[in-house]
Image (spheres, rainbow, N blue to C red):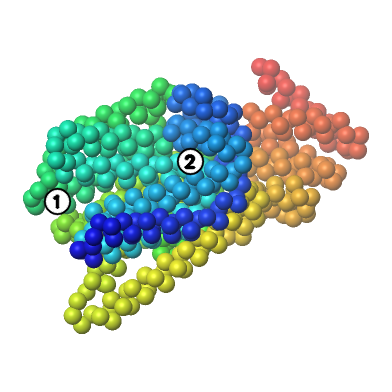
C-alpha cells in the first residue's frame, strides 16, 4: 500500500465520501426538528441572500435572546440563507447539503489521518469509522448540526493547509498555504465556537516531528504560521465582541437544560469528567442514542464517593497517559488524544457551564480523535508480521463487521430526526428520566388529541423537575379544556409564579376566570392573583 500510485490513492478518500453519504442519504426525507424551526424554518433573516452581510452583525438566535445565548455563527447562518435561495422552503435540499458536507469532512478526515499515520490502513479505518458512526446522526440529520459540519470542514482544511506550507517549493506558495490555513481556521470558528482550540491539534502534530529532520520538523518553529492563526482568532473574537458585547459563553443556561449550572464547581467538574466516560462508551457501543440529556437524564455527581467520579478521573488519567505515550513514541496516538481533548474541552463544562450537560452533536469533531486511535490500533494489528497472520485476518474481519454494524445503526437512527413528534416519542423511551423529553412527548400527544397520554407525560416531567414552568402551563391548559378546574388553576398559577416574565399563564388565567363553569372559590383565587400580578407589572 505504501507504493500505491497517485491515481489509486484517490480511490480511498472517494470511497470514504461515498460511504459517508450512503450512511446518511435517508435523512433527505426529514423535515425540521428542534432548533431547526426557529433558526432555519422561521428565521426572517434567511429570506434573502442579500441579508448575508447582516448575518455577520447578528447573533445566532433570531428572537432577540441571542446575546444571552453566547452564540455567534454567521457562516452557518449564511449557508442557510443560500439554501433558502436555492431550494426554497423545502428542507430536502438543506438536508442534502448536510449530507454532502459530512461526506466532505469524512474525505478531509482521510487526508488528515493519512498524514498523521504511517499506513493507508490507519487512514482508511479512521475515516470510515468517522463516516458511518451513529453518534454523528444529530450533527448530520438535524439541520442546525451544520455548524458542526462546517467547523469540522474548516478545521481539517486549515490543518491540511498548515501541513502543506513547509513543503511548498517557494516562499510565496508557503505564505499562500499559511494564509489559507488561517482563513479556514477563522471560518471554522465563525461556524461554531468549539473550533477555537484547533491550533492545539496542529501543534501536537508538528511536535511529533521534533527531533527529526525536514520541513515537518521546521514547521513547529515557524512563527509566521502561528502569528496568522493568532490574527485570525483575534479577528473572530473582535467580531464576536462587536455583536454580542463580549467573548463569554452562554449567560442564559438554566438548570433544566444543564443541571450543573448551579451545582457548584466540584459537582460541575466531577460530572463533566463522568460525561467524558459517557461519550467514550457511546463511541464504543452507540445502542442508546438520544437527542436530550438535560435534567435529570444524567444525575449530577455531587461527592467524591460517587463511583462515577472515580470512573471519570480514571478516564482522564487514561487520556493523559495516551498523550505521554504518543509524545514519547512520536506516534499518531498523540494527535488522536489531542483531538479528543481540544474539541471536547469548550463544551465539557470543565472551564465554564455551557448550554447543555451533554449532546451527541458535541462529539462530532472530538470523535475523530477516537477514530484516529482506533485506526492506528487496527492498522497496527493488521500489519503485524510473522506468526500473526490469524490476528491480521481477525482484525480485518472485526473492522468490517464493526463498520457494517455502525452503518446500520446510523441508518436506523436517522429517521428519528424527521420532526419533533418522531424525535420526542422515540427518545422519551430511551431517556425517560429527561424532563424535557417527557414534556415534548406530552406536547405532541396533546396536539394529537391524546389527552390522557399527554397528561401522564406532563405529570412525569413535573415529577422529575417540579419547577418546570412551561409544563405547568401546558398541563393547566390541558386540564382546563376538560373542565378539571382545580388542577388547571393550580398549574396555571404555579406557572405564573415560576415565570412571571412570561405573560401566557396570565393570559390563560384571564380566559379561565371568564368561564361561567369555574367554581366561585377558584374564581376569587384567580382574580386575586391577576390583581396582584397586574399591580406588580404596573410597578
Q: Could you tell me residue 431's position as x and y percent?
A: 57, 57
* 1 or 2: tag closer to the N-terminus: 1
Q: Nearer the viewer, mark 1 or mark 2?
A: 1
Residue 251 shows which numbered tag? none
The 10 Å Cα crowd at callout 2, few under 14, some 14 to 19, many 20 or more, is many
Residue located at (38% from left, 49% from top): 105
Callout 2: helix, strand or loop?
Answer: loop
Element assignment for label 1: loop
The answer to whether residue 353 is seen in the rendering is no
In the rendered view, does 279 fall on the left or right side of 531? left
The C terminus sits in image quarter: top right
At a point 55% along the width and 36% down the height, the residue shown is 86
| Pointers 1 and 2 in contact (C-beta within 8 Å) | no
Q: Which residue is mark 2?
A: 355
At 73% from the left edge and 22% from the top edge, which residue is drawn?
Answer: 534
Q: Position of residue 285 (x, y in %)?
A: 44, 65
Is residue 182 or residue 227 the one in the foreground? 182
Q: Is residue 369 shown above or below 537?
A: below
For label 1, the residue is: 209
Q: Gap in Å between the C-alphas at discs 1 and 2?
A: 38 Å
Q: Looking at the picture, tell me which residue is in the foreground, 177 or 403.
A: 177
Q: Quadrant of residue 239?
A: top left
Residue 223 appears left or right of 359: left
Q: Residues within 10 Å of mark 1 (few under 14, many from 20)?
A: some
Frontmost residue, 389 versus 97? 97
Residue located 25% across and 80% down the image: 389
Query: From the image, which quarter does the N terminus lie in?
Result: bottom left
- Residue 397 placement (x, y as % from top left): 37, 75
Amino acid at each position: 500500500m505504501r507504493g500505491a500510485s497517485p491515481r489509486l490513492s484517490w480511490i480511498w478518500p472517494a470511497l470514504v465520501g461515498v460511504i459517508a453519504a450512503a450512511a446518511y442519504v435517508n435523512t433527505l426525507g426529514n423535515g425540521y426538528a428542534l432548533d431547526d424551526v426557529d433558526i432555519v424554518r422561521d428565521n426572517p433573516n434567511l429570506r434573502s441572500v442579500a441579508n448575508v452581510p447582516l448575518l455577520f452583525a447578528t447573533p445566532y438566535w433570531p428572537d432577540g435572546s441571542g446575546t444571552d445565548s453566547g452564540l455567534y455563527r454567521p457562516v452557518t447562518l449564511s449557508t442557510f440563507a443560500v439554501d433558502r435561495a436555492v431550494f426554497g422552503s423545502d428542507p430536502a435540499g438543506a438536508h442534502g447539503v448536510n449530507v454532502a458536507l459530512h461526506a466532505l469532512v469524512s474525505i478531509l478526515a482521510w487526508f488528515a489521518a493519512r498524514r498523521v499515520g504511517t499506513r493507508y490502513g490507519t487512514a482508511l479505518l479512521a475515516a470510515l469509522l468517522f463516516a458511518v458512526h451513529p453518534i454523528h446522526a444529530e450533527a448530520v440529520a438535524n439541520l442546525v448540526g451544520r455548524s458542526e459540519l462546517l467547523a469540522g470542514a474548516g478545521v481539517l482544511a486549515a490543518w491540511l493547509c498548515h501541513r502543506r506550507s513547509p513543503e511548498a517549493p517557494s516562499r510565496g506558495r508557503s505564505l499562500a498555504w499559511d494564509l489559507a490555513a488561517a482563513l479556514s481556521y477563522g471560518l471554522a470558528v465563525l461556524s461554531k465556537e468549539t473550533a477555537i482550540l484547533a491550533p492545539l491539534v496542529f501543534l501536537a502534530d508538528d511536535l511529533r516531528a521534533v527531533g527529526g529532520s525536514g520541513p515537518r520538523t521546521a514547521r513547529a518553529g515557524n512563527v509566521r504560521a502561528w502569528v496568522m492563526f493568532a490574527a485570525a482568532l483575534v479577528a473572530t473574537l473582535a467580531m464576536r465582541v462587536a455583536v454580542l458585547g463580549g467573548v463569554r459563553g452562554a449567560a442564559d443556561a438554566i438548570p433544566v437544560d444543564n443541571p450543573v449550572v448551579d451545582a457548584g464547581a466540584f459537582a460541575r467538574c466531577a460530572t463533566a469528567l463522568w460525561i467524558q466516560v459517557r461519550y467514550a462508551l457511546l463511541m464504543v457501543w452507540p445502542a442508546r442514542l438520544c437527542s436530550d440529556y438535560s435534567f435529570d437524564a444524567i444525575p449530577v455527581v455531587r461527592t467524591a464517593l460517587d463511583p462515577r467520579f472515580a470512573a471519570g478521573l480514571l478516564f482522564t488519567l487514561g487520556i493523559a497517559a495516551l498523550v505521554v505515550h504518543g509524545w514519547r513514541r512520536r506516534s499518531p496516538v498523540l494527535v488522536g488524544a489531542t483531538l479528543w481533548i481540544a474539541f471536547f474541552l469548550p463544551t465539557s463544562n470543565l472551564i465554564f457551564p455551557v448550554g447543555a450537560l451533554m449532546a451527541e452533536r458535541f462529539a462530532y469533531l472530538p470523535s475523530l480523535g477516537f477514530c484516529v486511535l482506533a485506526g492506528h490500533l487496527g492498522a497496527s494489528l493488521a500489519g503485524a508480521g510473522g506468526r500473526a497472520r490469524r490476528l491480521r485476518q481477525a482484525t480485518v474481519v472485526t473492522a468490517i463487521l464493526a463498520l457494517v454494524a455502525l452503518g446500520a445503526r446510523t441508518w436506523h437512527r436517522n429517521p428519528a430526526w424527521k420532526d419533533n413528534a418522531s424525535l420526542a416519542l422515540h427518545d422519551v423511551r430511551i431517556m425517560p428520566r429527561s424532563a424535557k423529553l417527557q414534556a415534548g412527548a406530552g406536547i405532541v400527544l396533546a396536539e394529537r388529541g391524546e389527552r390522557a397520554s399527554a397528561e401522564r407525560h406532563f405529570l412525569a416531567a413535573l415529577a422529575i423537575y417540579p419547577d418546570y414552568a412551561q409544563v405547568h402551563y401546558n398541563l393547566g391548559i390541558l386540564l382546563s379544556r376538560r373542565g378539571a378546574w382545580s388542577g388547571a388553576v393550580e398549574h396555571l398559577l404555579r406557572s405564573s409564579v415560576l415565570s412571571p416574565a412570561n405573560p401566557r399563564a396570565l393570559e390563560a388565567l384571564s380566559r379561565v376566570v371568564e368561564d361561567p363553569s369555574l367554581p366561585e372559590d377558584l374564581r376569587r383565587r384567580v382574580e386575586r392573583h391577576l390583581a396582584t400580578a397586574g399591580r406588580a407589572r404596573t410597578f
